[in-house]
Amino acid sequence: MNIIEDIKSQYRTGGIVQKLIFWNIGLYLLSLIFFYNFSFGNFNFPSWLALYSNFDDFIFSPWTLFSYMFLHAGFLHLLFNMMVLHFSGRLFETYFTQKQLFGLYILGGIFSGIAFLVSFLLIGKTSVLVGASGAIMALLIATATYAPFMQIRLMLIGVVKLWQVAFVIVLLDLIQLPLDNSGGHLAHLAGALFGFLYIKMLNSGTDVSKIISSIQEFIENILKPKKKTPFKKVHKNKANSSSTSFTKKEKSMDQKKIDDILDRISQSGYDSLTKEEKEFLFKVGK
């Protein structure tokens, strides 16, 4: 029971990077229960969750551009992605806000999915894409584009510059692109490209991550419970009510008469008024 409470506490107090890691791990555990084929030792994700390059599948499940990035093909796939997410996320938060991180993560993942769909549609092949790699690459390359000479210490290697790390990772994806898992490597490169473009747009004054922030706030406002105004029973005195209504009507008539008299004065002067009108205006003035 203490472990569950500790996990809840870490989730509540942790930042957006920690929450993203929790979401990915939680959905991986759920997918083990519902979609893992223990006989063959692999996942069998349905077309309404994973991103299939078949255009007909995508048309009927467009939300898979979002859902695919929270699914993983195996434990090592999940472990490596979460390690890189933790690393890239902490670096990104050195310069940017958590809202920008979440926005870039989602948009980077969506951009990677679109690149995967278009590429496989053009070459006429079918494949399936899962994993947060494209979204994570967007964070890493965005940080490397913004602060390329940031120094980081890597185990067994020592101190290196961030641009060098980013360059090696992108190079490895380029080398492996024609060999195996072409869809995955293509998504990595698309995420890297989006991270680069994000910083260039940000430097020119456009923060596209605000799109996700606006959508998030809109959803939160819809889901936020509305405060109910307590019902109050009011007893009205009918006699007073009718008296008040009569007084308001009388005042309205007097005001109209005053307005008419003032209009006549402005057009024809005070002398154009009748004796009764002058007496009425004098009474009101008192």
Image (cartoon, helix red, strand yellow):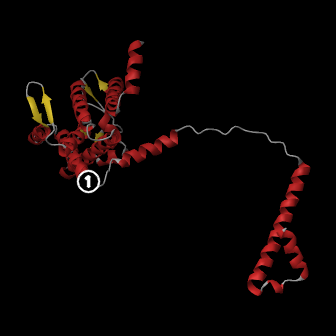
Percent across and percent down for residue 127 are 23, 41
- 144 relative to 3, above or below: below
Q: Residue at x 30, y 43 (%)?
A: 104
- 157 relative to 266, above or below: above
The quarter of the picture where residue 152 lies is top left
Nearer to the camera, 127 or 164? 164
Q: Is residue 131 visible?
A: no
Q: Is residue 18 visible?
A: yes
The single residue placed furthest to the front in the displayed view is 286
Percent across and percent down for residue 189 are 18, 44
- 269 relative to 210, above or below: below
- 284 relative to 29, above or below: below
Q: Is residue 148 left or right of residue 273?
A: left
Query: Tag 1: Cα neighbours inside 10 Å, few (<14), some, or many (≥20)?
Result: few
Nearer to the camera, 140 or 74? 140
Nearer to the camera, 168 or 51? 168
Percent across and percent down for residue 37 are 29, 24
The quarter of the picture where residue 275 lies is bottom right
| Disc 1: which residue | 201
The quarter of the picture where residue 174 lies is top left
- Looking at the rendered structure, the number of numbered marks drawn on it comes to 1
- Quadrant of image for the C terminus: bottom right
Label 1: state its secondary structure: helix
Q: Residue at x 47, y 43 (%)?
A: 219
Nearer to the camera, 162 or 28? 162
- Quadrant of image for the N terminus: top left
Q: Residue at x 26, y 37 (%)?
A: 94
Percent across and percent down for residue 253 are 84, 69
Q: Looking at the picture, which amino acid does disc 1 mark?
A: Met
